[in-house]
Image (cartoon, rainbow, N blue to C red):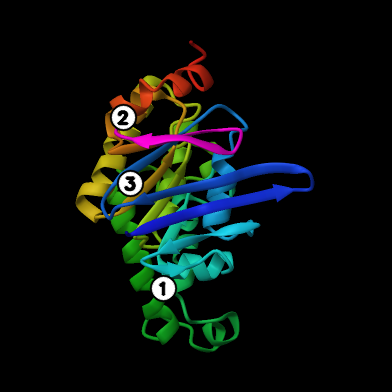
């Protein structure tokens, strides 16, 4: 199994946020998590990328346990994420924000960068190489027109695309998308669906997705896990999960 969560639990004081969560994700799959607000979906993401340390259970990426590693160590393994709320630097432009995602690949520190100034220096060549990678992402996501514009002045949907671009700058094998279409209009959502499929198909990135819009979930997901109150309800193919009685009751409010 490419990515696997086994019997994962975490509590905050007397609140059991996750309890006995288990699932696996195949390489190249789009795996979605659904559930009502407060179900524990983002908490699970925070455990995966090292922000939270689970109380029990294991998280394995390419058969190696990662649940005790720090966020930067997990990023180096090839796991990147976007956030439910946009986490960009508004006064930096699109290129600069995406370049921040390349920091794990840059070896030149401030001191050596100052000594080795110029395009032919090691620092200069490193800067050019990483800018080229960022340019490839900008081209992939059709962000050329926004390259030099401060992201704080960009439309909300474009900012979401820039954040997606920054996560891709880490060259991930596994990408965690936390409500990538939240707050978007219908046209922006269709664009995001297109790019998610493209990232999976062209870049070979495996995707773990949290999304409330069931039309999007049904459109792009290979499999779905439904959770409620931090506990798993069911895992399966989209049609199977969305017709499950407990899912209809907990998530869709029927039954």
- Compared to residue 126, the image places residue 148 above or below, namely above
Residue 235 inside the magenta-drawn segment? yes
Visible in this render: residue 155?
no
Which stretch appears magenta? 225-237
Q: Which residue lies furthest to the top in this view?
A: 255
For label 3, the residue is 144
- Compared to residue 213, the image places residue 160 above or below, namely below
Q: How crowded is mark 2: few (under 14 residues within 10 Å), some or many (20 or more)?
A: many
Q: Where is residue 178 in the image (x, y as percent from the top left)?
A: 49, 41
For label 1, the residue is 127
Mark number displayed over residue 3: none
Label 1 secondary element: helix
Label 2 secondary element: helix
Of the image marks 2 and 1, the number of the one nearer the N terminus: 1
For label 2, the residue is 238
Mark 2 → mark 1, Cα distance in angstroms: 44 Å
Q: Identify the image quadrant of the N terminus.
A: bottom left
Q: How crowded is mark 1: few (under 14 residues within 10 Å), some or many (20 or more)?
A: some
Q: Position of residue 130 (x, y in %)?
A: 37, 69
Residue 209 appears left or right of 53: left
Q: How crowded is mark 3: few (under 14 residues within 10 Å), some or many (20 or more)?
A: some
């Amino acid at each position: 199994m490419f990515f696997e969560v086994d019997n994962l639990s975490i509590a905050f004081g007397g609140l059991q946020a996750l309890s006995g969560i288990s699932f696996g994700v195949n390489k190249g799959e789009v795996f979605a998590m659904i559930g009502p607000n407060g179900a524990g979906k983002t908490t699970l993401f925070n455990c995966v990328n090292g922000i939270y340390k689970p109380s029990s259970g294991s998280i394995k990426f390419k058969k190696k346990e990662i649940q005790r590693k720090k966020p930067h160590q997990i990023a180096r393994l090839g796991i990147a994420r976007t956030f439910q709320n946009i986490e960009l630097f508004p006064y930096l432009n699109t290129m600069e924000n995406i370049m921040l995602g390349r920091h794990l690949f840059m070896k030149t520190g401030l001191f050596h960068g100052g000594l080795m100034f110029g395009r032919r220096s090691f620092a200069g060549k490193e800067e050019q190489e990483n800018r080229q990678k960022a340019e490839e992402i900008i081209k992939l996501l059709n962000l050329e027109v926004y390259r030099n514009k401060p992201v704080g002045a960009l439309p909300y949907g474009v900012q979401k695309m820039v954040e997606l671009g920054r996560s891709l700058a880490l060259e991930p094998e596994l990408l965690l998308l936390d409500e990538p279409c939240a707050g978007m209009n219908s046209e922006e959502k269709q664009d995001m669906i297109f790019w998610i499929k493209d990232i999976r198909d062209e870049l070979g990135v495996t995707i773990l997705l949290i999304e409330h819009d069931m039309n999007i979930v049904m459109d792009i997901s290979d499999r779905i896990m439904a959770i409620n109150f931090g506990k798993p309800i069911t895992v399966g193919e989209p049609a199977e999960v969305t017709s499950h009685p407990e899912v209809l009751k907990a998530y869709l409010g029927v039954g």
